[in-house]
Image: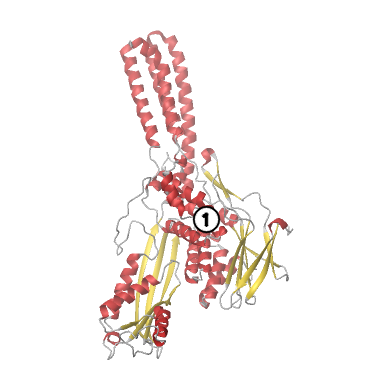
């Protein structure tokens, strides 16, 4: 190829190469990378698992470490709703073991801080409200197994996850965990701990009716749908939480054996807990990245405009035109490089979230005579109007010597990734 | 002039190529652990590859070893006229900490270690096997099975001492740095089952602190 032809083609080849740079850099997103698990291996893995849980178990294998905790959370709650308690126990143990592991000097964590990787690249551990809820569900399973001491350990550890709120008044204010910590301490006859938990609870819920030593049934009712996470701002750097949608159930009431209807106390608003956390430390990184992205985009755009003008102007400068073209090309290159950097910057906040959590949790502690009872649970909207389609009638068995936990949800929410 | 332009073009091309490859490198990292990791033995008496601030295997080994050494220095337990009967059962251990733990890990290791090293100076009562013992004795008394080598032992062993204990913890978190610390205190007491006197006590405490990467705070 002679040099004249090469020179003529440079205006086509150079932008072409640079476009390739941009496309290649932006084309592959790490967010949806999956592990290719051979089907035979997958079948062997799923063979011993309940069929209803196969979709999430499959996802657990395919999405690997990055989503392991999130998948375990979904799996655990799916399993609890379907009555596969051992699967639920294993899933939440796994999630909590990961939550409790300290991620220091971790490769994925370091990458998530980098300008070139989205926050969602990190291994998911959840926001504090999600971590607390993982402890909550594991604690409920311990209660079901009558292991009240480990249940209390879960509720206590859950409270500790809730201390990262920016504002002091919202730190460690997860009333649900204090209530349950007090309730299990009551079962263990640990008077001083019961008192501690309930005193703490009263600070946040002064009107709550505390469980009495003679109560033998604890009813926990969950309503609504999980808080949602969305990215907002330039480059979606800002994590915003919204209340779950498409549900009306806000309150609950129970009656036993056709008796008086009693309101179930709305103990915890999960959405409120999710939103009172305030800013995260990672937000400062992401905001910086978003500013970098916006500024480099602007600089790049300006430089490429200058380059184009220089190129056009060079034709009128006779002998100096080649040199001006060189300058123009160099400026253009810098402009495209800046744009490339802008395209590559990844300020997106991590918006993965635990999708089958409830919106609110309600509790009531009752003293019933041992034996079988008919429990009627009525779900109501925010105005107290009965939502008949959701109402439930169940038979409960109250043992002679120990307390019974009844855990109910207004609707089954089996999470399957779309 | 042409030579200059060609050089300029060459440099542009070279720079473009560098950018191209750097662009690719940005996302070349695949999902970690694609092929998994083979199983390996890890020392259970030292901090492993996965660590937190709760009670871990090295803590259980450290504390039970310390308790065993300490107990053997107490004449009331090891130099009594006749070897005392000791019950060590997780039922009498309490977990009031924020660490989930299977208490059998502590009591089993203590009982096994003490029994092995006591060489007859203490006798350990398997109260956790009492159902099985009673069932066997019933079969023997009914003549369904033979008497074994001690046919005259009519009663199950009673305990002289019982080992109890409690785990408590205090957590502290520094919101600004994300530094979390947990101080764990584990106490053991040997109580005389006749008098209620505490004849031996030992404790073990540790404090761990760690901070997650900033992206998790």
Residue A169: x percent and y percent?
Answer: 55, 61
Judging depth in this view, the residue of B13 and A71 nearest the camera is: A71
Residue A319: x percent and y percent?
Answer: 37, 8
Structural crowding at the residue carrying mark 1, measured as other residues with C-alpha within 10 Å and reported as few (<14), some (14–19) or many (≥20): many
Reading the image, the residue beneath label 1 is A130
Of the 4 image quadrants, the one containing the C terminus of chain A is top right
Q: Residue at x 31, y 18 (%)?
A: B7
Of the 4 image quadrants, the one containing the N terminus of chain A is top left
| Residue extending furthest toward the top | A318
In the figure, residue B41 lies in which quadrant? bottom left
Q: Report the side of A383 relative to B50 (left or right).
A: right
Judging depth in this view, the residue of A173 and A356 nearest the camera is: A356
Q: Identify the chain of the residue marked 1, using the numbered disc in the image.
A: A
In the figure, residue A222 lies in which quadrant? bottom right
Residue A247: x percent and y percent?
Answer: 66, 52
Residue B109: x percent and y percent?
Answer: 33, 72
Judging depth in this view, the residue of B12 and A284 nearest the camera is: B12
Q: Report the side of B81 relative to A271 (left or right).
A: left
Disc 1 on helix, strand or loop? helix
| Residue extending furthest toward the front | B144
Picture layout, residue B141 above or below residue B14: below
């Amino acid at each position: 190829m002679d040099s004249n032809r090469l020179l003529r083609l440079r205006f086509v080849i150079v932008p072409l190469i640079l476009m390739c740079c941009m496309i290649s850099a932006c084309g592959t997103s790490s967010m949806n990378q999956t592990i290719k698990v051979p089907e035979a291996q997958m079948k062997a893995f799923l063979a011993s698992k309940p069929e209803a849980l196969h979709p999430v178990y499959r996802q657990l294998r395919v999405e690997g470490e990055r989503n392991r905790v999130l998948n375990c959370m979904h799996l655990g709650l799916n399993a609890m709703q379907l009555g596969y308690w051992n699967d639920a126990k294993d899933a939440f143990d796994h999630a909590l073991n990961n939550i409790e592991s300290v991620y220091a000097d971790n490769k994925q964590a370091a990458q998530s801080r980098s300008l070139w990787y989205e926050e969602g690249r990190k291994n998911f551990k959840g926001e504090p409200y999600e971590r607390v809820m993982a402890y909550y569900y594991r604690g409920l399973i311990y209660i079901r197994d009558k292991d009240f001491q480990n249940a209390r350990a879960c509720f206590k550890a859950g409270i500790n996850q809730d201390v990262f709120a920016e504002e002091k008044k919202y730190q460690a204010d997860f009333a649900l965990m204090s209530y349950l910590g007090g309730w299990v301490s009551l079962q263990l006859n640990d008077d001083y701990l019961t008192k501690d938990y309930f005193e703490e609870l009263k600070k946040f819920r002064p009107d709550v009716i505390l469980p009495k030593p003679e109560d033998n049934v604890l009813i926990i009712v969950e309503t609504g749908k999980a808080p949602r996470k969305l990215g907002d701002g330039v480059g979606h750097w800002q994590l915003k939480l919204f209340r779950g949608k498409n549900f009306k159930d806000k309150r609950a009431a129970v009656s036993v054996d056709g008796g008086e209807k009693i309101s179930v106390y709305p103990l915890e608003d999960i959405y409120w807990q999710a939103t009172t956390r305030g800013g995260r430390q990672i937000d400062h990184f992401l905001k910086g990245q978003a500013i970098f992205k916006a500024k480099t985009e602007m600089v790049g755009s300006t430089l490429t405009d200058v380059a184009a003008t220089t190129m056009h102007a060079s034709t009128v400068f006779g002998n100096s035109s080649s040199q001006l073209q060189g300058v123009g090309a160099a400026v253009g290159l810098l402009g495209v490089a800046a744009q490339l950097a802008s395209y590559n910057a990844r300020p997106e906040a991590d918006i993965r979230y635990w999708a089958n959590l409830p919106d609110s949790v309600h509790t009531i502690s009752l003293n019933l005579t041992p034996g079988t009872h008919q429990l009627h649970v009525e779900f109501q909207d925010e105005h107290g109007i009965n939502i008949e389609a959701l109402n439930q009638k169940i038979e409960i068995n109250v043992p002679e010597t120990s307390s019974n936990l009844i855990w109910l949800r207004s609707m089954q929410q089996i999470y399957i990734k779309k | 002039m042409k030579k200059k332009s060609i050089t300029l073009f060459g440099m542009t091309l070279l720079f473009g190529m560098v950018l191209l490859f750097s662009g690719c490198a940005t996302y070349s990292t695949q999902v970690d652990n694609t092929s998994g990791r083979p199983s390996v033995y890890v020392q259970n008496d030292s901090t492993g590859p996965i660590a937190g601030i709760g009670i871990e295997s090295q803590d259980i080994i450290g504390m039970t070893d310390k308790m065993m050494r300490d107990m053997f220095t107490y004449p009331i337990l090891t130099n009594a006229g006749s070897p005392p009967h000791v019950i060590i059962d997780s039922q009498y251990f309490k977990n009031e900490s924020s660490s989930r733990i299977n208490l059998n890990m502590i009591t089993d290791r203590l009982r096994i270690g003490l029994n092995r090293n006591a060489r007859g100076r203490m006798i350990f009562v398997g109260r956790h096997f009492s159902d099985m013992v009673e069932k066997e004795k019933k079969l023997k008394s009914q003549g369904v099975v033979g008497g074994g080598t001690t046919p005259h032992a009519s009663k199950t062993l009673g305990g002289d001492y019982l080992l109890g204990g409690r785990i408590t913890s205090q957590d502290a978190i520094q919101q600004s740095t994300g530094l979390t610390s947990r101080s764990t205190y584990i106490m053991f007491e040997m109580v005389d089952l006749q008098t209620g006197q505490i004849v031996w006590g030992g404790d073990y405490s540790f404090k761990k602190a760690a901070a997650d990467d900033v992206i998790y705070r």
